[in-house]
Image (tube, helix red, strand yellow):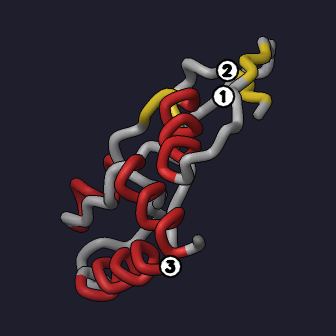
Amino acid sequence: INIYNCDALYNNVIDVDEISKACVAVLRSFETNIGLFNLAASEPVPMRTAVQYIIDTLTSDSKIIEVQSDRPSFHINTDRITSDLGFRPLPTLQMLKRIVKNNI
């Protein structure tokens, strides 16, 4: 598995369960908090850690190949949805665990 920017933080993952919980949080505070809210897993982890976690969870023989890249990586800041709505998305590794479990 080729991975670019292995040390870059990763949390760009979400599932329908977490999206529905976020929608409920938005609807409950609709009168007081209007705006845009980023949604992704909380507690970003290095990309290498995320991919290795999936490999280990699936007991796969896949190997990580680190590829250098000049393109920057990013993670999604979820501070506003947490501070304004009190919604804290699942941490990245827990989100990956649930997604993998629900799709094998």
- Name the residue located 72 percent from the left edge and 17 percent from the top edge: 66
Q: Secondary structure at mark 3?
A: helix
Q: Position of residue 25 (x, y in %)?
A: 29, 78
Q: Nearer the viewer, mark 1 or mark 3?
A: 3
Q: Give the mark nearest the N terminus, 1 or 2.
A: 2
Cα–Cα span, label 1 and label 3: 24 Å
Asked if the residue under mark 3 is in contact with the one under mark 1, i.e. CB atoms within 8 Å, the reply is no
The three-letter amino acid code for the residue at tag 1 is: Ser
- Name the residue located 24 percent from the left edge and 86 percent from the top edge: 28
In the image, 67 versus 73, the foreground residue is 67
> Quarter holding the N terminus?
top right
Residue 5, numbered circle: 2
In the image, 36 versus 100, the foreground residue is 100
The three-letter amino acid code for the residue at tag 3 is: Val
Q: Give the mark nearest the N terminus, 2 or 3.
A: 2
Residue 65, numbered circle: none
Question: On screen, 18 above or below 58?
Answer: below
Asked if the residue under mark 3 is in contact with the one under mark 2, i.e. CB atoms within 8 Å, the reply is no
Quarter of the image for residue 62 reads: top right
Question: Would residue 71 be found to the left or right of residue 17 on screen?
Answer: right
In the image, 85 versus 41, the foreground residue is 41
Q: Secondary structure at mark 2?
A: loop
Q: Position of residue 35 (x, y in %)?
A: 44, 67
Q: Which residue is mark 3?
A: 16
Q: Secondary structure at mark 1?
A: loop
Q: Position of residue 5 (x, y in %)?
A: 67, 20
The three-letter amino acid code for the residue at tag 2 is: Asn
Q: Give the mark nearest the N terminus, 1 or 3.
A: 3
Q: Tell me the crowding category of disc 3: few under 14, some 14 to 19, or many 20 or more residues within 10 angstroms, Cα based.
A: few
Question: On screen, 46 above or below 60?
Answer: above
Q: Which residue is mark 1?
A: 73
Asked if the residue under mark 2 is in contact with the one under mark 1, i.e. CB atoms within 8 Å, the reply is yes
